[in-house]
Amino acid sequence: TIYVDVIDLVNPTFTVPSDVTVTLDNSCAMDTIPASIGTPTGVSDNCTTSPIVIYTNDFINLNECSSTGSFDRIWTVTDNCGNTVSQTQTITVADTTAPILAGVPVDITIECSAVPIAATPTATDNCDSDVTITYTEVRTDGICLDGYTLTRTWVATDNCGNTDIEVQVITVADTTAPILAGVPVDITIECSAVPI
């Protein structure tokens, strides 16, 4: 009698998917990143016909920018004898969606006596709840002292540096004539009584 122990000590082989960059969807949740960002190819083993393929995510190098950055997806292939081999795919996560400003007034032309105070727009973003809004105003003088333009600019910036820029142009004009007061009425007088 001859006893033969057949032992499989050979690891399976495969090609790991290429590194990729993905954009967060509107939920901005890391768990919404699809599992189908590439799958291993060329999976083979010397004995096992269909080795088991799994992956785990190692969330490292994440930024404060809406949980973006990069993380490693570790692919592991295991044959029926427990031989395993692992390779790493790096997935870079990006937020490329700009915030949206709301409440920016339209361009207007007004009298110099009716220049409105600056509006206070709001902004929403697909990922961030704390969008930063900055405001600037530039005056450009016209041909007369009371005629000029105001260019008001609002910039909304999310945590990833995406921006929305909205501008209001106010054209200030003085088209109202001055009003005289105290003009005497017409009179008929003697030549010796002409008023100064």
Image (cartoon, rainbow, N blue to C red):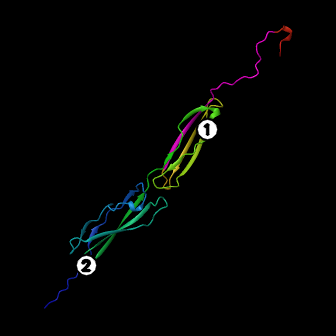
Residue 28, percent from left and from top: 43, 57
Residue 166, percent from left and from top: 51, 43
Name the residue rendered at 66%, 24% in the picture. 177
Which residue is outermost to the top?
190
Residue 35 falls in which quadrant of the image?
bottom left
Q: Amino acid at mark 2?
A: Cys
136 shown above or below 95: above
Left/right of residue 73 with respect to residue 10 in the rendered view: right
Q: Which mark is residue 116?
A: 1
Span shown in magenta? 163-188
28 shown above or below 114: below
Please tell me which of labels 2 and 1 falls first in the chain. 2
At numbered mark 1, what does the secondary structure look like: helix, strand or loop?
loop
At numbered mark 2, what does the secondary structure look like: helix, strand or loop?
loop
Quadrant the C terminus occupies: top right
**Mark 2 neighbour density, 10 Å: few (under 14) some (14–19) many (20 or more):** some
Question: Disc 2 to disc 1, how far (Cα)?
Answer: 78 Å
Q: Which mark is residue 39?
A: none
Q: Which residue is mark 2?
A: 81
